[in-house]
Amino acid sequence: MKSNYLKIGCDVIKLVYKTLRTNNICGKILYVADPVVDNLYGTAVREQIQEIGILKTELVEYNTISYAMSIAERIIATDVSCIVGMGGGRVLDVCKYASYISKTPYLSIPTTVANDGIASPIAVLKRQDNKPKSLGCAIAPMMLVDTNIILKSPEILIKAGIGDTISNYMALLDWEYASLKGKDEINGYAYLMSKNSIDALMKTRYQKICPDFIEVLVNSLVLSGIAMDFAGSSRPVSGSEHLFSHALDYYSDKKNLHGLQVALGTVSMLKLIGHSCDEVVEYLKKFEVDVNPKTLEIDEETFVYCMQNSRQMRTNRYTYLDETDLSTQRLKKIYKELVELL
Ligand SMILES: [Zn+2]
């Protein structure tokens, strides 16, 4: 089944029944959410599922690879016909992977938009040693993004979503650079989608986070996800700034939101390659997206170490990091500038 049923807007959470019916879903339906989200919005979703099929409920507490695999196994063994996942990235990535492994249709209902994972073909799950691992899978074939619900989510998560979209700015520069150096090919369609994603966000007439702005942000994040799917890799939306964020995830004890880390990575890289960062910094400040290394509790030593080791996070992704002076002295200087600027 390739239905690609997507609705973005106010109160679209009421369309669960209609979505399932349109896609000919019946029988056992596994509803997956975390307890907090279930408390807030679960009743409305569960009632609609019960109108069309047999409701099975799974309240998620973990986001490990083995847990997602165990759900997939149960789906196969008990003939579940569809997964309905509701929540933030952690729950949705578990569902996305379980759906992919079990080849079961999946309706995704994001309640936060902290990154472009909402519509990406990639699930980030934890390995046994607690480190994150990106796993290739598929975009959810059915998705309902209720902007009313997103608006009620913690503002910092919305700001992280802004940050992840902003990172397309650097990712596209890296892609162009890799292409120029003969290290990668640009997929024109995917490039255009990623470019449109960031342009729509940066040229928005909205000056603050409001319902209409949320719709623009969700559109941008979904477009980023489709760009990845189209390119067959995260390349259109993930360059050196993401490698830096991966290094932070790997080496730093302080855990920050992905979207904030990649936004910091974007400004850092722009500075490192001598590109103007005014437009990006101005935008972040307008929406009060604070990515100052001090706020994120990233000290100078961690910044320098992670920047110097970013390259190793993914050796087959050619970026500006490959040919930029990453000497300790230079990075310390950039760090000081960032603390003052952001
Ligand atoms: Zn990202």
Image (tube, rainbow, N blue to C red):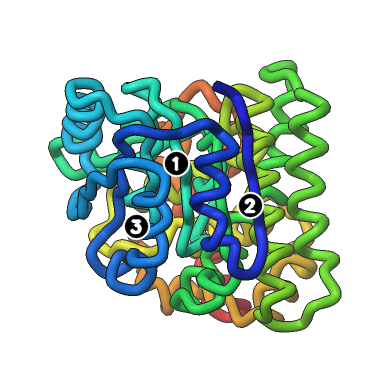
Nearest to the eye among marks 3 and 1: give it.
Answer: 3
Q: For the residues marked 2 and 1, what is the alpha-carbon distance in whole angstroms?
A: 24 Å
Label 2 sits on residue: 221
Residue 268 locus on image (x, y percent):
59, 58
User: Badge 1, how many Cα within 10 Å: few under 14, some, many 20+?
Assistant: many
Residue 229 locus on image (x, y percent):
62, 29
Q: Quadrant of residue 97?
A: top left
Label 3 sits on residue: 46
- Res. 241 visible in picture: no
User: Badge 3, how many Cα within 10 Å: few under 14, some, many 20+?
Assistant: many
Q: Amino acid at mark 3?
A: Arg
Label 1 sits on residue: 310
Q: From the viewer's perspective, is 50 left or right of 63? A: right
Q: Amino acid at mark 2?
A: Leu
User: Is the CB–ligand 1 distance for label 1 below 8 Å?
Assistant: no
| Front-most of residues 121 and 337 | 121
Q: Quadrant of residue 177?
A: top right
| Front-most of residues 310 and 329 | 310
User: Considering the image in quadrants, where does the N terminus appear?
Assistant: top right
Q: For the residues marked 3 and 2, what is the alpha-carbon distance in whole angstroms?
A: 27 Å
